[in-house]
Amino acid sequence: MSDFIAWMQACQSRMESVLADTLPPVHIAPQRLHEAMRYAVLDGGKRVRPLLAFAAGEVTGGTPDRVQFAAAAVELIHAYSLVHDDMPAMDDDALRRGKPTVHVEFDEATALLVGDALQSLAFDVLAAQPLADDPAMQLTMLHLLAQAAGSRGMAGGQAIDLASVGKALDLAELEFMHIHKTGALIRASVLLGAHCGTPDAATLAALDHYAKCIGLAFQVVDDVLDAEAPTATLGKTAGKDASHNKPTYVSLLGAARAREFAQELRSDAHAALAGLAAPAPHLRALADFVVERAF
């Protein structure tokens, strides 16, 4: 476990530097927008998606110097989604990662532009850096991220989430929503990291199944934490799902059964890794981390 923690901290530190270098500096116009972009991205978050990209890259021979840019692209998309999700038109939250949300710290118009700018920067990073020997592979990576972020992925999942407030969803409907809202970007993280190396079809299939399990497990645990953990621990407003009358795994299954479901998804993720030709200790440890995390 100590080896995993050291690896995780090294990756997180590396990503903080990469993101700081990738984001526009505050002295370049428009200064306020660039300041808000850096506020939204830096100094916060567990960087789970970059960690998954690095761990998947290890399986396929992707070098960290390549994976770091694919990881940055995913993290920029994730950060933009949080900025927009927190706005009054969406979840209307005042706290994120233990500090005021972007629209509170700056203003709503700036927050909207921050999300727009971070999204375009993500694709700029993914297109501009040499991430694959075959240009066609890099185009595939752009396609993967675009689908994961769009109406058939994260944005579509958010639309379903907003339309589901006050409704009673069954398990299949809830999973469909979160496969898109949360799972799509987590899946993209794994596949983008893998594509920085030389994956074969069997490896990609195994990693894809692993990522789908982890994506759902992440959301299940998120729902449990929202219901049970205090705001100070979460770094965001606790109990938000219940107060907004949102369907969650806790409201559908109860907290105890939701925790059991997360454990089942972890077991399925571990099983997916068992068929890989290369060892994947960090992917396995990340599955444990996602399910056992306390915030």
Image: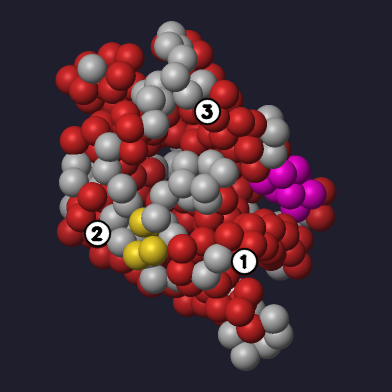
Query: Label 1: few (<14), some or many (≥20) within 10 Å?
Result: some
Q: Amino acid at mark 3?
A: Asp
Is residue 89 in sight in this rendering? yes
Q: Which residue is mark 2?
A: 5
Q: Which residue does the image show at 69% across and 39% down from the upper left?
A: 150
Based on the picture, tell me whether residue 243 belongs to the magenta stretch: no
Instruction: Give the mark nearer the N terminus: 2 vs 3.
Output: 2
Residue position for label 1: 110
Q: Nearer the viewer, residue 140 or 60?
A: 140
Q: For the magenta stretch, what is the residue range?
A: 137-146
Q: Position of residue 199 (x, y in %)?
A: 61, 42
Going by the numbered disc 2, the residue's amino acid type is: Ile
The residue at which mark 3 appears reads as 161
Q: Position of residue 103 (x, y in %)?
A: 51, 61
Rounded to the nearest angstrom, the CA distance separating label 1 from label 3 is 24 Å
SS majority, magenta: helix
Query: Measured along the vertical axis of the image, is residue 40 above or below residue 137?
Result: below
Q: Nearer the viewer, residue 212 or 46?
A: 46
Gap in angstroms between the C-alphas marked 2 and 1? 36 Å
- Taking the image as shown, residue 18 lies to the left or right of residue 31, namely left
Q: Nearer the viewer, residue 186 or 287?
A: 186
Kindly identify the residue that appears in the image at 69 percent across and 58 percent down: 116
- Residue at 52% x, 48% y: name it: 88
- Check contact, mark 1 vs mark 3: CB within 8 A: no
Q: Nearer the viewer, residue 250 or 72?
A: 250
Q: Nearer the viewer, mark 1 or mark 3?
A: 1
Front tag of 2 and 1: 1
Q: Is residue 57 left or right of residue 47?
A: right
